């Protein structure tokens, strides 16, 4: 396998539409993202901005049709994923690239015991014997903080609490030692204490297994806790990318600033959040020029006419805004 650089995943100019009877929904409009091994990249943006379409396209799970890849490339370990036959993608999924979801219920089979589900992965993908797979499953339950528990192994998903289900799903996702983990809002359904525990677990996975992790969230407060680098997505376009520190301390894009002002602050009870006025445009109806201009306090005439180019401001910090100097 040829690896051209350190990037585990390199998405270049990925452009995807959903073709429907009432018109095309332009879900991704030429996005660029890179993830290295041992790095957590957060993809953050409001609902409908294109986060899930991004992760599903990496997994090869965006159905074409109705989706159409207009342009772009998805290089994983230097090799193109777009256009790979389904059978090859199935092998890569679970084995090399794994995913955890907001809702463990989407991933865990309610009629199979947790142990059966994890051992099945190990037997299918890694060719282990039943006995080896059971031993290994116990090790992974331990890794995700459930202990080497035969009780959990023999439990059905409904017998576990929300936090335990989330941990069991993560154990399943990582048991074949994937090099890339996609986590789509993995903590959103959990209470604050559990959220922090799961974030800690994800950080430890990065360190222990040197995984590259795409962490999807709409909450910059959580992103600040976990990400090494952050890309902000709006209406299917990356509007700002930077290291964690640079994004929070030297915010460039007005959309990122607006998201920052809408972070709930646990310490300031009763503190009113400034919600961003308006909403993310429909992918079928994206405004001309900068797609954020109708909601932007700084917008000028130029913003409603001309799409801003992404400019590099040094040290990997880039933004696409006419008003940033
Ligand atoms: N199968 C589909 N057919 C048509 N449009 C779609 C389809 N899937 C997604 N879209 C559109 O693509 C855009 C991006 O959707 P996506 O699910 O990626 O958003 P998201 O950022 O994950 O939002 P959320 O935070 O709510 O999960 C939306 O405008 C959505 O309506
Ligand atoms: Mg989503």
Image (spheres, grey):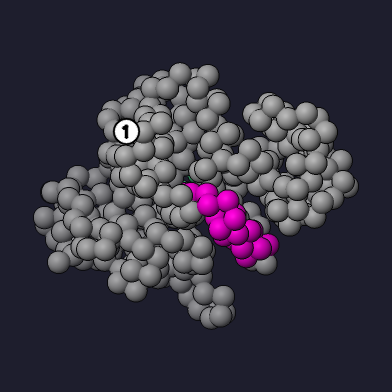
- Residue 307 falls inside the magenta stretch: no
Predominant secondary structure in magenta?
A: helix
Which span of residues is magenta-colored?
A: 194-216
305 vs 211, left or right, is left
- Is the N terminus in the top left, top right, bottom left or bottom right quadrant? top left
* Picture residue at 73% right of the left edge, 37% below the top: 118
Which residue is under mark 1?
Answer: 73
Q: Is residue 252 above or below residue 160?
A: below
Q: Position of residue 85 (x, y in %)?
A: 45, 18
Q: Nearer the viewer, residue 148 or 280?
A: 148
Q: Nearer the viewer, residue 204 or 26?
A: 204
Q: Position of residue 274 (x, y in %)?
A: 41, 70
Q: Residues within 10 Å of mark 1 (few under 14, many from 20)?
A: many
Circle 1 SS class = strand
Q: Position of residue 194 (x, y in %)?
A: 68, 62
- Is the C terminus in the top left, top right, bottom left or bottom right quadrant? bottom left
Q: Is residue 157 above or below residue 189?
A: above
Q: Nearer the viewer, residue 229 or 263?
A: 229
* Picture residue at 51% right of the left edge, 63% below the top: 226
316 vs 136, left or right, is left
Residue 36 visible in the picture: yes
Q: Is residue 251 above or below residue 27?
A: below
Taking the view exactly as shown, the residue that stands out farthest to the bottom is 268
190 vs 225, left or right, is right
* Picture residue at 63% right of the left edge, 54% below the top: 189
Q: Is residue 28 above or below residue 309?
A: above
- Residue 199 falls inside the magenta stretch: yes
């Amino acid at each position: 396998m040829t690896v051209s650089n350190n990037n585990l995943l390199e998405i270049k100019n990925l452009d995807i539409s959903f073709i429907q009877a009432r018109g095309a929904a332009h879900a991704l409009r030429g996005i660029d993202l890179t993830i290295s091994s041992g790095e957590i990249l957060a993809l953050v943006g409001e609902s409908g901005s294109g986060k899930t379409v991004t992760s599903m396209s990496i997994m090869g799970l965006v159905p074409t049709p109705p989706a159409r890849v207009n342009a772009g490339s998805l290089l994983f370990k230097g090799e193109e994923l777009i256009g790979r036959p389904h059978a090859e993608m199935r092998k890569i999924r679970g084995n090399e690239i794994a995913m955890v979801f907001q809702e463990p219920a989407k991933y865990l089979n309610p009629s199979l015991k947790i142990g059966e589900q994890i051992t099945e992965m190990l037997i299918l993908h890694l060719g282990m014997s039943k006995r080896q797979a059971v031993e290994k499953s116990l090790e992974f339950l331990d890794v995700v903080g459930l202990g080497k528990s035969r009780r959990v192994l023999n439990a059905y998903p409904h017998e576990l609490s929300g936090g335990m289900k989330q941990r069991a799903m993560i154990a399943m996702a990582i048991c074949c030692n994937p090099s890339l983990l996609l986590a789509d809002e993995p903590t959103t359904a959990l209470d604050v204490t559990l959220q922090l525990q799961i974030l800690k677990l994800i950080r430890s996975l990065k360190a222990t297994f040197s995984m590259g992790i795409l962490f999807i969230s709409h909450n910059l407060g959580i992103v600040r806790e976990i990400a090494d680098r952050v890309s902000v997505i709006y209406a299917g376009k990356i509007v700002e990318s930077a290291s964690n520190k640079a994004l929070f301390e030297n915010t460039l894009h007005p959309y990122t600033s607006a998201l920052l002002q809408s972070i709930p602050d646990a310490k300031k009870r009763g503190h009113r959040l400034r919600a961003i006025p308006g909403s993310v445009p429909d992918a079928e109806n994206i405004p001309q020029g900068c797609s954020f201009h109708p909601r932007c306090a700084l917008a000028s005439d130029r913003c409603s006419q001309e799409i801003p180019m992404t400019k590099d401001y040094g040290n990997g910090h880039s933004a696409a805004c006419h008003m940033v100097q």
